[in-house]
Structures are given as C-alpha cells and as structure tokens.
Image: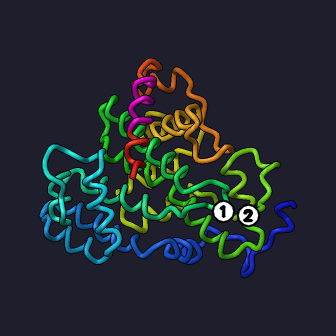
Amino acid sequence: MSIETIRPRTGTHLTNDPDCLLAITESISATGQVLALLNVAISNPRTTITELAAILRRDVMLSARVVRTANSAFFFNKNSACKTIEEALQRVGMREIARLVATATMQGLAPNRLRAYGITGDQFNRSVLFTAAASQLLAKEVGMDSNLAYLSGLMRPLGILSLNKWAEQSLVHVDHLEWQDATSLLDWEKRTFGVNHIEVSCFITRKWAFPALISESIEKSSDQLACPAESPLALVLQTAETLAESNRVALHAKQQGIHLRKERLEALGIKSVQLIEITRNALGYSRIATTP
C-alpha cells in the first residue's frame, strides 16, 4: 500500500496553519492548558508554591502523576513519601518544578501504542527521557542552563503525539502506513501528514508558554548546518538525539541523528570521551524514570 492510497476520513493533509495545529494539539489533552498556566506562573519570581499547587489541582490526573513522579526513584530522597501537591513541589524546589511537571505530563500523554508510528508508549517514553537526560547532562558539561536543556529535550518529540492522535482519528489505514520510500522520520511525516513533528513541537511549546529559547532551539535542531555559536542548545539536542540512535533508544528506526563531527563537538565544548559517561547516566535515568 502506498502513501497515495491512504486518505484522511475528513479533510486533507495537515498544514502549518495555526488553527489546524491548535486543533490537533488540544486533542491530546487538556493538560496543556494547565501546563501553560504553570509555565507563566513559574516565570514570575513572586509566585508561591501554594499558587502553583492551586493551578495543578485543576487537572486531577496530572496532580496525581506529579505526586507519583516526585516519589519516584528519580526525585526520591530519604525523607518520607510526599502525599500532597505542596509536599511534592517543596521536595524538588522552585527551580525543578517545571522539570517535574513536564516529566509527569509527558509520561501521561503517551498512549499504550502509537499506531501511526508502530511503536509502544513505553518505547516513546524511554527514548524521550533518555534524550531529555542526555540534553541536561551535555548542557551541564558546557555551563549551559541544564534545566532548560532538559525541557527542550523532553518537549522536542511532543509533536509526534499530536500527529499520531490526528492519524488515528483521520486515516483509514493508520496501522499500515508506508515507510519504505522514506529517507528519515521527518521526511516520512512531511509526506504523510504535511508537517513534521518538529514543526508541531515548536507550535505547541509556544502555545504552552515555554521559554522562547526552547521553541527556537527545537526548530533549529533539525538543521544539520546549525552553527554552534548561533544555537548551542540546538547542537545539544542534535547530540542527544544521535546518542539515542547509537544506543538503540531512538524514537523510531527511521530517526536519523546528525553526524557528530569532532569540530562541532569541540566548538560546543564537549570532548568525545565525555559522551561515554553522559550516555551511561542518561540510560540509567531513562530506566529509573520509566520503572513503575
């Protein structure tokens, strides 16, 4: 079956039209509205934990995931388990709250199986968490904002969830999409949907009020010629994606990381030998964070 024989039940391919992207974004979950409010609140230095907790309580399921995530091996400390949103937020501290909530959000958004992509939700989560952790560790090595890098790595594949949701609702043969002629994941998405997940992720992160640098870096991370001096965070994301591919935790077999040329890594401030430890730690984190 070729791509040309697969037709949406309604409408045609997606486009970069804001209304179209907004529709599929909102179809994922109402959690995005809560996350947007939270991001705005976090950007205000006067916001208190009590106020953040009040925002999170608007989404009961997200609130429960935040508490559960705060009690996980990743955020756990020797204190007793937290039982309330306030305790969970206090445990991680104001600087870590965005990372905690975004992690809980992503883990709750992935379905058991992403039918359009032919991968499981566990595969998606493990890859996303590896890439986020690797981005954070890379950024820390070069003196960049590691929390911002983590959020960028975490949010970069968010568009996949939107495109998968749209495909399941709109394509008759969603379980039998043709991949053979695609040269990469982005190429296949563009030909199948009309947009790729990077474009959708940029739209979503802007809509959900993430820092502008996150959206900009996600957008530039798909450019193989991106200059390290102009967009160091984009190069961090490229490096993290390539590490995921080389360690068999890529999002999809068609995902193609950008070749890590020595001079580009050195321009960023990373030596090849450092990638071994970063990879080991990111793999450990992705296993811990996806363990029930």
Q: Quadrant of the N terminus?
A: bottom right
The residue closer to the viewer here, 195 or 277, is 277
Task: Name the image quarter holding residue 267.
Answer: top left
Task: Name the image quarter holding residue 52.
Answer: bottom left
Q: Which residues are magenta?
A: 275-284
Q: Is residue 17 above or below residue 228?
A: below
Binning the other alpha carbons within 10 Å of mark 2 as few (below 14), some (14 to 19) or many (20 upward) gives some
Q: Position of residue 81 (x, y in %)?
A: 18, 55
Q: Residue at the spot x=20%, y=69% of the render?
A: 53
Label the magenta part by its dominant secondary structure. Answer: helix
SS assignment at label 2 = helix
Residue occupied by mark 2: 175
The residue type indicated by label 2 comes to Asp
Q: Residue at the spot x=20%, y=74% of the render?
A: 54
Residue occupied by mark 1: 115
Q: Is residue 287 visible?
A: yes
Q: Position of residue 174 (x, y in %)?
A: 73, 67
Q: Is residue 230 visible?
A: no
The residue type indicated by label 1 comes to Arg
Q: Position of residue 157 (x, y in %)?
A: 52, 54
Task: Name the image quarter holding residue 6.
Answer: bottom right
Q: Is residue 211 above or below residue 242?
A: below
Q: Is disc 1 in contact with disc 2, using a CB cutoff of under 8 Å? A: yes
